[in-house]
Structure formats: structure tokens, C-alpha cells
Image (spheres, rainbow, N blue to C red):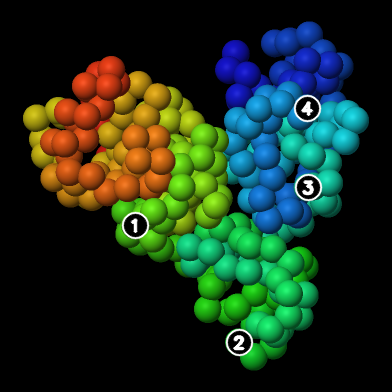
Amino acid sequence: MDRRLTPSSGRFALESLRGQVEADFVPGEGATVVAPLAELCGEPGGARDRQVLLGDAGIVVERRNGWAFVQMAKDGYCGWVPESALGVAEEATHWVSAPATHLYPEPNLKVRELGALTMTSRLRVTGESGDWLETTRGFVPRAHVKALGDWHKDPVAVAQTYLGVPYLWGGNGRGGLDCSGLVQLSLRACGIECPGDSDMQMKLGEAVADKKPAKRGDLLFWKGHVALAMNADFIIHATAAYMAVAAEPMKAALARISGAGGGAILARRRVGG
């Protein structure tokens, strides 16, 4: 079983795994991420697997020494997050549609912000105040959010708004992204659910024959890496080669990746037609 998708902490597991693993079984407890961004780790205090964003929903399986083992609703990813980053479950109404925004304690751009938010963060709006929306976590500029269901249309255009953002292994936020983090953010901003890691993303959509030219939005996969085709000649990806989100000529990227031992493209998938 894939550890990343198995809601078992070793000691406790969700009831859905009864008969598949040895553990004490629990129904789980709904929770919502209340920090602007939090680390999702393979073990308490361990290395980062991914990051989770404000408003992401999950099911808590176990709490231990200030950490909580959760399965995230958006992609099924499992891991440990600081307990302080979680609050009671709540239903979101809106999402951050700008590349980034700030959360404020009041509808006033001159006060000190509460934190920085990344696109696709979820919010529950409870009121309005001019150019501001009030949420359960604070105030956000109205221009930076949309109602759930009012999605962007082009994942590549979303990815382009993150050009130059630094590469960060396991990163899912405006402060740093890895290849699969960029793809997940770009697709989810367009209402397309997407797994967390590139090997999981290789199952999205439909396979595209190698001989066909790449189409805007195609996902291109190498071993341990994924990129979005901008068109037949350019890709955009978060890459350690430049330590940033970068646009790169297709032919140059193919030669560079192959020369560095990354091999040829393993698959190309078309998502959303």
C-alpha cells in the first residue's frame, strides 16, 4: 500500500482500512487547516512530503505530541501536520484566485497582515465591507477571491503567474513550489482535482501519442518530474535546474534533462480535452 495514500499512522487507522492493516481503527475527526500554510511530513517533526494551505480539509486519524496524522480531502495525501495548524471542520465558500494575497485582522490595508495566502486556499466568507470580504480567519481583498465553482480556465496561464517563484522540494505555496506542486495548483485553480506527486499525476486524463505535437496544457512526465506544455515548442515547470518556476524551449529542455540523466519523456497526458 502507498504510504502517502494510506490513512494509517501505524498505531491507528481509519475504519475504511479494516481487514487491510493491523491497527486500532477509528472513524476519524474532521478538521480544517487554519494556518496560511503548514508542512505535511512523513513522521512527526520529520522531512516535508508536501504542504497544505489555509482551508484545506482533512480527517485526523491520530494526535501525538503536538502533531496530528491526517488524510487530506483534496488529494488523499496522508501525513503529519502540527496540531496548531488545524482547527474544527468548516465548509468553505470561496477560494483565493489571485497568485497571492494577504489576510488582515480588519478591512484596512494599512494594518499589519495576519499572513500571506496562496492561490487555491479556501475561505468561508461571513460578511462584506466595501472592497473587502470578511471570513472566519480575517479579511481579504474582494478582488483576490472568487466563489467556489468560479474557476480559472487555463492551467498554463495560472502557472505563468508563478514564473520566477523559487523551487522548493515538496512546496505548494507562493513562497516555493516543486514540479508537482505547480501542476496541482494550476489544475485545481481551474476546478480540476489533482494528486500531490508527479507519479500519481501520471494517471490523470488521457494518454497522448508520442508522435502528436504537444498541445497547450498537456502534462509531460519524466522519472520524478512533470511539466506543463505551453504549446508545441515551450514548457513551463518548477525545476531544480533553475531553482525556480521557468519557461523553457521544449527541445532545449529535452536535451538538458536527458544529458543530466533524466532520460526521455515517459508519458504525456491530456487533461480536460
Q: Position of residue 42 (x, y in %)?
A: 68, 25
Q: Residue at x 64, y 91 (%)?
A: 130
Q: Position of residue 183 (x, y in %)?
A: 41, 43
Q: Quadrant of residue 152?
A: bottom left
Disc on the earlier residue, 2 or 1? 2
Looking at marks 3 and 1 on the same chain, the residue that comes earlier in the sequence is marked by: 3
Q: Would you say the residues marked 2 and 3 are in contact, meaning their CB atoms lie under 8 Å apart?
A: no
Give how far apart the Cα atoms at labels 2 and 3 are. 28 Å
In the rendering, which numbered label is found on residue 44? Answer: 4
Q: Which residue is mark 3?
A: 85
Separation of residues labelled 1 and 4 (CA atoms): 34 Å
Which residue is situated farthest in the front direction here? 242
User: What's the amino acid at mark 2?
Assistant: Asp
Q: Which mark is residue 100?
A: none
Residue 1 appearing in the image: yes
Q: Residues within 10 Å of mark 2 (few under 14, many from 20)?
A: few
Q: 122 left or right of 161? A: right
Checking the image for residue 160, the label placed there is: 1
Q: Which residue position holds label 2?
A: 131
How far apart marks 2 and 4 lie (CA) works out to 41 Å
The mark that comes first in sequence, 1 or 4, is 4
Amino acid type of the residue that numbered disc 4 sits on in the rendered structure:
Pro
Q: Does the rendering let one see residue 207?
A: no
Q: Are marks 3 and 1 in contact (CB under 8 Å)?
A: no
- Which of the two labelled residues, at mark 3 and mark 4, occupies the earlier sequence position? 4
